[in-house]
Amino acid sequence: MIYSVHKPETLHADILLPASKSISNRALILRALSNSMHDIHNLSDCDDTEVMLQAFAHPTEVIDIKAAGTAMRFLTAYFSTLPGERIITGTERMRNRPVALLVDALRKLGADIGYVEKEGFPPLKIKGKTLEGGEISLSGEVSSQYISALMMIAPVMRKGLSIRLEGNIISKPYIRMTQQLMEVFGVKVSWADHTITIPPQTYQGVPFKVENDWSAASYWYEMMAFAGEEAEITLDGLYKKSLQGDSKVAQLFEVLGVTTKYTEKGVILKKTDRIVSPFIYNFQHEPDLAQTFVVTCALKNIPFQFTGLQSLKIKETDRILALQNEMKKLGFPIREANNSEISWAGNRCPVTHSPIETYEDHRMAMAFAPVSMILGEIEVNDPQVVNKSYPGFWKNIEQAGFTIHKK
């Protein structure tokens, strides 16, 4: 299916954003580890959280987590500590996403995990048991989800766990989020310099409410950056003091002409005339915002240089390559360097007018849909990929005045 997205005449909307997928999925693991009967309120309704719920409700021999990378990593660690034998599998793309770093780490800590098909990739066969734990070293540049997965199961290991992070540590806010959530569930976590130390402890079940999603908010900031001076958007359920590193989006968009007013209800976005060009930034701590800023800057004719993007290669797709392919269709030749940098110098190339491909990646669809505000219309292939994190995205932008035609 293809959606043809047409720009609104004006942009005025009051939007209730989805709950945070990142917090929801961590909270589900922590509730399971604490054997808690308490509810998690405002749980995300996205596909990634749904497969987590299914895995806990029906921990059968074969668990299909579909395209949910977070679920693959968190559940691999969790089920390695839970008695029983299970196979975790997923979509074809998931079966080609590397997981060896996590498996190797878990094996060193005593886990019994084997590869069902291809070495280093799902499906995984897991025989759960109590893990020994101890000490382990990992590169600080691996996905924060590997580190978070190990952290959350550390208290139930016989010796607990000490994780030494070597070199540059990327995605620190996601690791800090995991630490703070573990502490909410009664576990003490020490993070000093490059070492995270978690002694053996017992989780405590608590009632918990999930924040709304700052990553989802980024697409509304992008729309506001493209809108006229009279535009105004209210986003409910966002807070200045947030567990989410992507709350940084409010500060970053200040230099792209969008200001944020915090209220008891959430935030109000309005236009300003402040523009900084070129835009240079290291996204190592907010990699999920990269697609939003690539599209926003290019369509506003702001040259940019973005670094710290090494984790984009192992996301739902190779996001650097996907951005190069799709931005080229719009006439913007994006350069890559060192597998971790992308830039645009202001030059142009021929426009092709073909639909935007989404590569089974929710953030590709949502980052490119607002381009209709500049071009008048844009076509997006496989629009249902937004279900991974923001199932109500298309309904919400129609609420804001966009028109969508299905093809």
Image: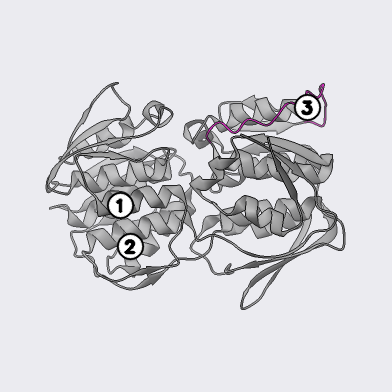
Say if 349 sits above or below 365 in the image.
above
As drawn, the label of residue 151 is 1
Numbered badge on residue 39: none
Side of 307 where 32 appears, left or right:
left
Q: Is residue 231 in view from this perspective?
A: yes
**Labelled pair 2, 3 in contact (Cβ < 8 Å):** no
What residue does disc 3 label?
353
Q: Is residue 82 left or right of residue 139?
A: left
State which tag comes first along the sequence, 3 or 1: 1
Colouring? one colour
Callout 2 secondary element: helix
Q: Tell me the amino acid under the disc marked 2.
A: Met
Residue at 51% from the left image edge and 59% from the top image edge: 244
Q: Are marks 2 and 1 in contact (CB under 8 Å)?
A: yes
Question: Is residue 252 visible from the viewing direction of this image?
Answer: no
Residue range of the region highlighted in magenta in the rendering: 345-360
The N terminus, quarter of image: top right
Contact (CB < 8 A) between labels 3 and 1? no
Q: Which residue is mark 2?
A: 182
| In this picture, residue 59 sits left or right of residue 218 | left
Residue 185 location in percent, x, y? 30, 67
Residue type marked 1 = Met
Dot 1: element:
helix
**Please, what is the dominant secondary structure of the magenta stretch?**
loop
